[in-house]
Image (tube, rainbow, N blue to C red):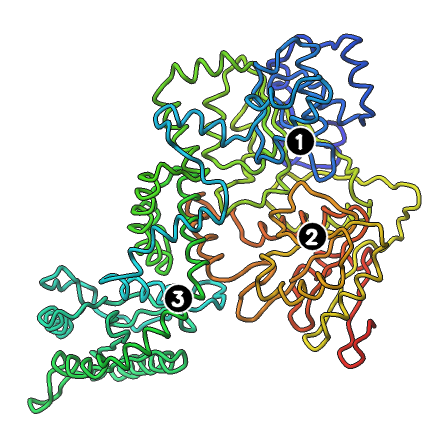
Amino acid sequence: MPGILVAAVGLVALTAFTYLSVVVVKKATKPVIDELREPSKDIVDFANQGNLDEYQKKALLSKFKQTLVMAGAGAGKTKILTERIVLFAKFLKIPISNMLVMAFNKAAAKEVIDRVAAVTGDYPYSLKDNIRTIHSFALDIARGENPKLELVTKDKEKRNLIKQALNKYKSGATQSVYMGKVVNLFGNLEPKENINKHKNVPEPGKKIRCSDGTLVRSKAEKRIVEKLIENNIRFEYEPMVAWADMYFEPDFFFPDYMVYAEYWGMMYHENEKIRERYCAQMKWKQEQFKKYKYYWIDIKPNVNENEQPPEDSLISKLKKFKTHQFTAAYHNKIKKIFNAIEDKFVELIIAVMDITMAYGIKLKDLIPKADPFVKAVLRFIIPICEDLEMSIELKNKATFTMVLNKAVKRLRKDKQLGKSIQEKYKCIFIDEVQDLQPLTRRFIRLLTGKEQNLFAIGDDYQSIYSFTGSDPMFIVKFEHYFPEAEVMQLKYNYRCHPNIVEISNRIIRNNKHQRFKQVIGKFCDGQSETDKVLTVVTVSDEVPKETLADYLLSQIPDKEDIQILGRYKETMPIIQPYMSVINHKFKGRKMKYRTIHKSKGLQSDNVIILGCVDNQDGAYCFPAKDNFQRIKDKILRLCRCNNKFNLVEEETRLFYVAVTRAKKRVFVVTVKGRESKFVDKKFLPRDLIHETAMCPKMNTVA
């Protein structure tokens, strides 16, 4: 306390002192576990048997009924969780049948089961009802209302389920409307840093109502709409279009013709400056149609009686686009674009449904605060999401988030059920707490009573599942949700070379919204502070992939294992060419490719990170920045009602996770001229890394 006062001055010092004083007062009133207030000799001996460091012992013997343990990569998180369970069973005489241990996935739950069984002598199978995933426990609760409910656990199964539900939009009368809308909104993957909309010359508001309810800006446009209705021509008025350099709204889109139309209503405006600006705007639109090879019709006002009225002119011109040859060719073009982006669109639908459900927010409630483009996206996907939810429900299926939502609803409705769960489970343990959604937080609070022991463990530096609604703010504000909780930290990383630990510390310091903490590595025999444990390998497109594979093989001793990680799946263009060669060259080596998300919780001697590039078109970059990512980013921000979510911070945590999978060496592969920002000195300090470049002419390492 005095040290803080000396370091600070004036009001800052007073504020720091006041805050810390409040914390001290709170600590004195926090509920404690009687047996751990002053641990017995047997308990102390038990803690000393495990070769634990001082921070691990402190966490294991935490006397507080509610404890959050911040456990970084390689800190022995699972060991402490397991030892705490055994401690409660052996010395506090709480049977495991009265404990509920919830892990993030099956692999983590199995690891805890195996470790506990090895110490207690229980059969692993007998522990599965008490040590399990959060979602399996939620499923048991949800099945109280629907015994046939099944959990969709595989990503592929989830995508196929969504695609099946979307099939009705891809055939029959709705096909052209649906596919045209998808192409309009998502047909260009080039990243738009601020998702800008093209600035239009101010026009009259949409105040004139047509017979079908469409609101238009002028009487001339009303006549056009009425003529379209009369001729049974489907149209969309001022749709948002995202395939151009900037987002803009053409006056009309005709999905059955795959043609746009622009009405030059202000080309004869009496004000010369407005007229010039308006014509420049219309010419910009023409350039966009030409550049991206879309067809359009210009409709101009008639200035004398001999000219055809705009509405008749449009109908005449549309007929030219209705030939079988034209529509077949154009439908093929649209299908090609649609097929290229369909998987990303499906992933967006899944993410949006998960995110909004996780935050307990209805999609329609996001529209008022959304920018024009996200507004258009939301209006398009809302009916699709509603249909999908109903379709999945009818099949008695549920995603992870849906199951949690059903469980929370049942617990809120059935107070007696919640009370009986609290009476049964005297202790609740939560693993990987950084990956929890706000919905999961509500679920846990409904399960946790005042008399229960709550032991949560995790690391906000490794929160990488925002696309499912997970929120690192749960850890950052843990005391807000559980005011009686004590927060502790495991400081040592026993997995990684200390220089890898220092590099990872430098990487994560680029983020602002987190609990800042010190992670320390420990040097082992043969390790030195001068070791260059991370190598940035810069290749050019001309260098054969075999050259890179040969170099990597030469740097890794034969008996050491290897993880090859990437931001995207192995089949993606940024990864596949390298992996086809590496798979051939590395035969006989203990090696596997995984996405970084799938590598969570794993470790190996060596880690190779492929695809650290910044492509101009925005596709397959690391950090990711394509428009699908940006839409998710904006929807997350709307759900959180603030700007604390940042796409780059999520990607930085992903890079941190990749680097900290390595025990001995890390190789970061980038491409000359397309280097990722992650290879910049801001993330990778030059005093701790080695840099290697592949020479294109000699096909050698420089």
Residue drawn at 75 percent across, 39 percent down:
519
Residue 312: x and y, percent?
11, 81
Q: Is 295 drawn above or below residue 202 in the view shown?
A: below
Q: In the rendered image, which residue does mark 1 sit on?
A: 111
| Residue 338: mark | 3
Which of 696/639 is in front?
A: 696
Q: Amino acid at mark 1?
A: Glu
Asked whether the residues under the numbered discs 3 and 2 touch, taking CB atoms below 8 Å apart as contact, a structural biologist would say no
Q: Please identify the residue farthest to the right as the structure is shown.
A: 526
Q: Amino acid at mark 2?
A: Lys
Crowding at mark 2 (Cα within 10 Å: few <14, some 14-19, many 20+):
few
Ranked by sequence position, the earlier of labels 3 and 1 is 1
SS type, badge 3 = helix
- Is residue 266 in sight in this rendering? no
Residue 489: x and y, percent?
70, 31
Residue 62: x and y, percent?
69, 19
**Residue 430, quarter of picture:** top right
Residue drawn at 46 percent across, 58 percent down:
344
| Residue 592: mark | 2
Residue 226: x and y, percent?
10, 70
SS type, badge 1 = helix
In screen coordinates, is 219 left or right of 497? left
- Is residue 342 in sight in this rendering? yes
SS type, badge 2 = strand
